[in-house]
Image: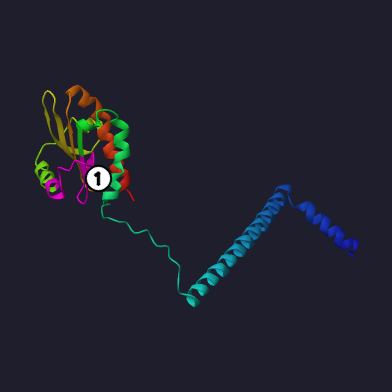
Amino acid sequence: MLTKLEMSKKKSYSSDVPPEEVSDLSEIKLKKKRFFIILSIVLTIGLSLVFIIYRQVKEIVVNPKLSIPRLPQLSLSKPVVTSADIEDLTAAISQIITIDQSNWNIVVANSTAVYNWPSNRNHFDLSQVTAISNKFSRLLPSTLLAELLPQGLLVREESSSNQDQQKITAVIYPPTSTPIFFDLQYEGTAEEFQKIITELIPTIYWSTISQSTP
């Protein structure tokens, strides 16, 4: 208990302090309180992080074998079309050439197999295909067939047209498979031939590419 004398002294001291100083003192105390609260939070978080890092380092030291995901290996080899794959062209070609099939002779090949349509006609073997492909490598790119195929494909071709005999021999160089060779011969008018090949050539290309893609 304070005596009357002490209480009177305290009152007199308080009355001597200006209100501005009292406000400043309160603000200083509040700032100090906030500082210590923030400091305690930072220290708590920091200690937690230290313990987490310590546990991780300790686990790595005890078990040094880390499971590192492996990147998939890229295959740089070009897919090869087998003879069985190329023979699947029969259905695709037969859907386009529905009449006068006997007037057509179609050869499709790559570096390993030769397909002939109709099957009873066989005018090319792999050695002939290779020789023609090597010869075509010196020709200028074709613009006629390029318009029927995806943009950017390299195509080289030779064509001839008589009154009743039409022929196109060409090599397509796809970016992700072996070159595609084809020879199209038709006994009929150029107009009929042109009408059929606008659908036939893209079908041959896409059918062969779909078989050569793994």
Q: Amino acid at mark 1?
A: Pro
Which one is nearer the viewer's eye here, 37 or 56? 56
Magenta stretch holds residue 125 = yes
Name the element at disc 1: loop
Report whether residue 149 is seen.
no
Q: In which quadrant is the N terminus drawn?
A: bottom right
104 horizontally vs 28: left or right = left
The residue drawn where x is 13% and y is 44% is: 133
Residue 159 in picture, x, y percent from top left? 13, 32
For the rendered model, the colour scheme is rainbow
Q: Is residue 129 visible?
A: yes
Q: Position of residue 140 (x, y in %)?
A: 11, 36
Q: Is residue 67 above or below residue 126?
A: below
Q: Nearer the viewer, residue 8 or 49?
A: 49
For disc 1, the marked residue is 175
Magenta residues? 107-129
Local crowd at mark 1 within 10 Å, few (<14), some, or many (≥20)? few
Counting from the top left corner in percent of width and height, residue 16 is at: 77, 52
> Residue 45: x and y, percent?
60, 62
Q: Is residue 198 above or below residue 124?
A: above
Q: Is residue 190 magenta?
A: no
For the point 30% across and 47% down, the residue is 85
Count of numbered circles on the image: 1
Above or below 29: residue 124 = above
Farthest bottom residue?
62
Is residue 34 left or right of 75 when viewed as pictured? right
Q: Residue at x 45, y 73 (%)?
A: 65
Residue 55: quadrant of the picture = bottom right
Decide: is 88 above or below 166.
below
| Side of 168 relative to 62 (left or right) | left
